[in-house]
Amino acid sequence: MSIRHGYEKNMQAQLDEWKTRLATFKEKVDLEETNLQLEYYTLIEEAKLELEAAHKKLQRLKQASDETWEELKTDVEITWDSLHELIKALTLP
């Protein structure tokens, strides 16, 4: 397996994990009866949008030529860091 293929595979696995964590978190928020529900739902929607953006960037990375792959990789990593922080912020008190 090439370094590129391994990198893309790991990024896809991380994206899938975050999608699952977000769905699990939404299920927990659905059970909450607090004023924080609206705030959490807003964060969940923001995270869903970021997940979709990350997924699209990963797809572009997978289709990139060798010449543009490194440049796109940097862009994906910036999105990944932002999404990772957002997912970490989604924890119930």
Image: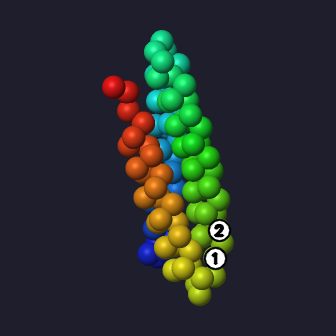
Q: CA distance from mark 2 to mark 1?
A: 6 Å
Residue 43 is labelled as none
Where's residue 70, x and y in %? 51, 80
Examine the image and state in which quarter residue 62 appears. bottom right
Residue 13 can be seen, yes or no: no
- Amino acid type, callout 2: Arg
- Residue found 51% across the figure and 60% down from its top: 79
Seen in the picture, residue 76 relative to 16 is either above or below; the reply is below
- Residue found 40% across the figure and 50% down from its top: 85
- Residue found 44% across the figure and 43% down from its top: 87
Seen in the picture, residue 40 relative to 57 is either above or below; the reply is above
Name the element at disc 2. helix
- Between 1 and 26, the one lying in front of the other is 26
Q: Which residue lies most toward the left here? A: 93
Q: How many numbered circles are shown?
A: 2
Label 2 with label 1: CB-CB less than 8 Å: yes
- Between 11 and 45, the one lying in front of the other is 45
Residue 51 can be seen, yes or no: yes
Where's residue 46, x and y in %? 57, 42
Residue 60 is labelled as 2
- Between 35 and 46, the one lying in front of the other is 35
Seen in the picture, residue 91 relative to 56 is either above or below; the reply is above
Way the structure is coloured? rainbow
Which residue was labeled with disc 1?
A: 64
- Residue found 59% across the figure and 38% down from its top: 45
Where's residue 22, x and y in %? 50, 36
Q: Which residue lies most toward the bottom here? A: 67
Seen in the picture, residue 49 relative to 90 is either above or below; the reply is below
- Amino acid type, callout 1: Ala
